[in-house]
Amino acid sequence: MLDILTVCTGNICRSPLAAELLATRLADLGVTVSSAGTRARDGAPMTPEAQELAAARGIPASLSAEHAARYLTLAHIAGADLVLAMTRDHRREVVELDPSRVRTAFTVRELARLAADVSDEELRAAAGSGSSGSGSSGPGGADARERFAAALAVVAGRRGLVLPPASPEDDDVIDPYGRSMATYERSADEMAAGLAAAERIARIALS
């Protein structure tokens, strides 16, 4: 089974919203998407504003209501094929916990920026070369994870080649906690392209 992990600070605004949106996008592929926070209080619920954003984007209210925050641990990272952090600091903390994740952890906006420089054909070619031919080519098979890893490696390889953002902060998703609903909307908008990029990579790799 392909696993994606989203990470923010409290695991009550950005990362659970990102996880629910991405899980909905990839439901037909059987991809598992979960979330955690670098400073989370275990069991804390999503904020009402984040739940409202999720509902407005088609997420069942019951799903958001069931969310319980998790404090990020090495075990959460270990099973992830892709880690989508909301900020550079979150990504840094992920890599500090598990240095082997340096090429499979991105900020969500960084993933959008790098993936935009990679064509569908490049992703398909990489995924094909990552296939072991073991016969487990379905979305839940080991071969699927290899294909996804190979496609993701092409995107990671664009680091240092693609022009950096005008400001380093442009790779971060704004933290809306304790702020206006307009800031929550901005936060959701800032992660949208990265979630679309993750879906695109997964669909091409698993097709």
Image (cartoon, helix red, strand yellow):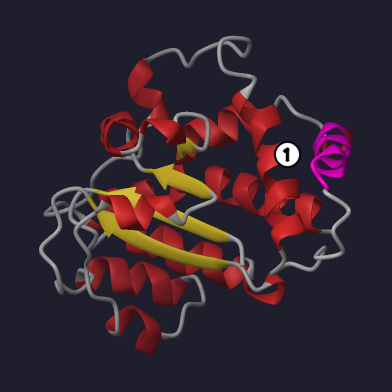
Q: Residue at x 32, y 73 (%)?
A: 52
Nearer the observer, 59 or 101: 101
From the viewer's perspective, tell me whether residue 134 is left or right of residue 179.
right
Residue density around tag 1, few if under 14, some if 14–19, many if 20 or more, within 10 Å: many
Q: What stretch is highlighted in magenta?
A: 122-131
Of all residues, the one furthest to the bottom in this rendering is 62
**Which quarter of the rendered picture does the C terminus lie within?**
bottom right
Q: In which quarter of the image is residue 35?
A: bottom left
Q: What residue type is labelled 1?
A: Ala
Q: Quadrant of residue 203?
A: bottom right
Check the image and report above or below for 99 versus 79: above
Is residue 14 visible from the viewing direction of this image?
A: no
Residue 184: percent from left, percent from top = 29, 54
Q: Residue at x 35, y 42 (%)?
A: 86
Residue 179: percent from left, percent from top = 15, 51
Residue 62: percent from left, percent from top = 36, 89
Judging by the rendered image, the residue that carries numbered circle 1 is 151
- What's the magenta bit mostly, secondary-structure-wise? helix
From the viewer's perspective, tell me whether residue 180 is left or right of residue 22.
left
> For the image shown, how many numbered marks are present on the structure?
1
Quick check: is 126 in the magenta stretch?
A: yes
